[in-house]
Amino acid sequence: MRTKGINVVIALAITTESVLRMIAAVLGSYTLNSLIGFHTQRFIYFTLLEIAAWLGFMAFLFIGRYLQGKALQRMDLLLRRDVMTVLSKQTYAGFHEKNVNTYASWLTNDITMIEERGFQKVYSVISFITDPIVSLVVLFQYHWSIVALTVVASLVTTFLPQIMHHKMEAASVATTKQNESFLSKIGDVLAGFDTLFAFHKTRNMVSSLMTSGKKLAKARIHQNTVDAASEVIGAAVNVTSQILTGLLTGYLALQRITSIGAIMTTGSLSANVYNGLANLGPELNTIRGVLPLFSKYHLDSLNARNDQSKAAKPMASDLTAKQLSYAYDGKLALAPINFNVPYPSKVAIVGDSGAGKSTLLNILSGKLRAYRGSVQIGTKELNQLPLAVLQSQVLYIDQLPYVFNETVRYNLTLGDNFTDQEIWHALAESDLDAYVRLLPDKLDNLAGENGRLFSGGQRQRLALARGLLRDRKILLIDEGTSSLNRASAIAVEDQFLSLKGVSVLFVTHQLHSENKDRFDQIIQLHSPAEQH
């Protein structure tokens, strides 16, 4: 409905094209009859009218194609927005059920297929419907038997190719799945270039591409084969129908029921009917073939009621857990734990690999809601808090925070409105302001692909500045120094521990002696296996 207006205009333009083309065909028969009868003036008159009809046809053809181009891009953009809106409403676990390359395929390959095999085909279908209708109306002036034959043959032409539509749907779905697999494989291989380079295995990139590419090529070849079979069925019926129409019109001319000039016109008009309906079946099959793509987007969720909770003003609150645990598919990932973190506190969370340190932070950040036991911020149970409210209190910083290929400003504000003074203050608190001031464009400098302008420690400080800019009261830092050398790690720890008015829960494998005594408490986690 969002593009209804322009598509109605396009439909009218296509219909006008059909009418003008049929008028030109009829005028052609009058021109031929005038020539046969040696009527010079009538010949010139009908020739001029025919030229005018063709000029009008070409004008509406241009208008229609121009508007189709605009409408297609508009519909593509709206569909991409809808898909991205659905993705933006996903839960943390729901989003990570698929990898980002699958979503990229949805937004590129799939929508390109929907445009080419869906939206564009709808315009073709309009033409294939209007052409036969207008042609049949005109054929009535010649003889009813021509119309009767054309109608019967048209029904066969339309419905016979429909036997292929189930195969076309299956072929379209198979192709989109291979598109997703191909994009995922290529993304994985390219991301692993450094590892392959270190082991002199970069040739594996080519073999991986070819293996995945051959599967995609096979799916596309199968899809083209099914399309071709549908088109051949329609074409065979079409040719047979045109031959029968030519024979009937010739018979009527011999019986002097129609003029000789009518042979040319009825042939042209019946061809419009047969060609239109011969193509209508395959085109409808093609459109049906892309309909299953929409089901995986779950666009019906766009009408679902959104969480209207607004982010609350950050509050100074204690954090308390009682018999808190978590299990993945029945397997315990975090053994029951009790703790109390008064506000503001600096807390180290330690434990062996597999003890549940990251799981604990994922619970506290709201990513995992189906925990057992209790964990409260202040007096509020964490999984009862709307996510927007929880995220206004808590900031999660992972080992290597993601940096967008955008400006430093955007990486801090993420589209929210903050003054330059507020941004520089947050950068100063995170000890990153001096570095940013050295950049050519300062806050408006691009961070580079994957944040290449920032070292690991600087990324940590950038993520910290994001939270400080929003006055987060609880910081959750997951292995924030694991990828840094000792000097850089101690400097980053010192930065977190020096923050005032903030509770910091810091997951680490190694407590540095220089900062160990600065933590208010140390929470020791044990592997779930040790609890048995």
Image: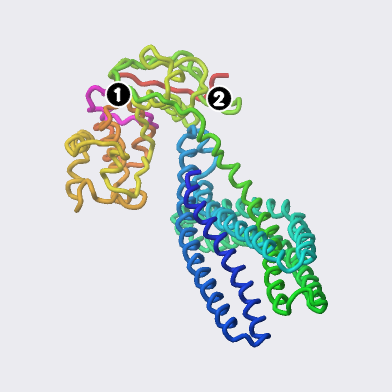
Say whether residue 495 is left or right of residue 63: left
The x and y percentages for residue 244 are 80, 71
Residue 3 x, y percent position in the rendering = 48, 48
The kind of residue on which mark 2 rests is Ala
Q: How many marks?
A: 2
Q: Is residue 220 above or below residue 393?
A: below
In the depicted view, which residue is nearer to us: 171 or 27? 27
- Mark 1–mark 2 CB contact (< 8 Å): no
Region rendered in magenta:
496-519
Asked if one can make out residue 149 in the rendered structure from this viewpoint, the answer is yes
Which residue is labeled 1 in the image? 473
Residue at 29% from the left image edge and 19% from the top image edge: 315
Left/right placement of residue 429 relative to residue 57 reads: left
Does residue 167 appear left or right of residue 50 in this picture?
right
What secondary structure is found at the residue carrying circle 2? strand
10 Å neighbourhood of mark 2: few (<14), some, or many (≥20)?
A: some
| Relative height, residue 394 to residue 290 (above, below) | above
Q: CA distance from mark 1 to mark 2?
A: 28 Å
**N-terminal of the two: label 1 or label 2?**
2
Q: Residue 371 or 30: which is nearer the viewer?
A: 30
- Residue 516 among those drawn in magenta: yes
Question: Helix or strand or loop: what does disc 1 sit on?
Answer: loop
Left or right: residue 516 versus residue 179 is left
Q: Quadrant of residue 28?
A: bottom right
In the image shown, does 229 or 98 lie closer to the viewer? 229
The three-letter amino acid code for the residue at tag 1 is: Lys
Q: Nearer the viewer, residue 313 or 14?
A: 14
Q: Which residue is mark 2?
A: 327
Q: Residue at x 48, y 42 (%)?
A: 82
Q: Is residue 151 magenta?
A: no
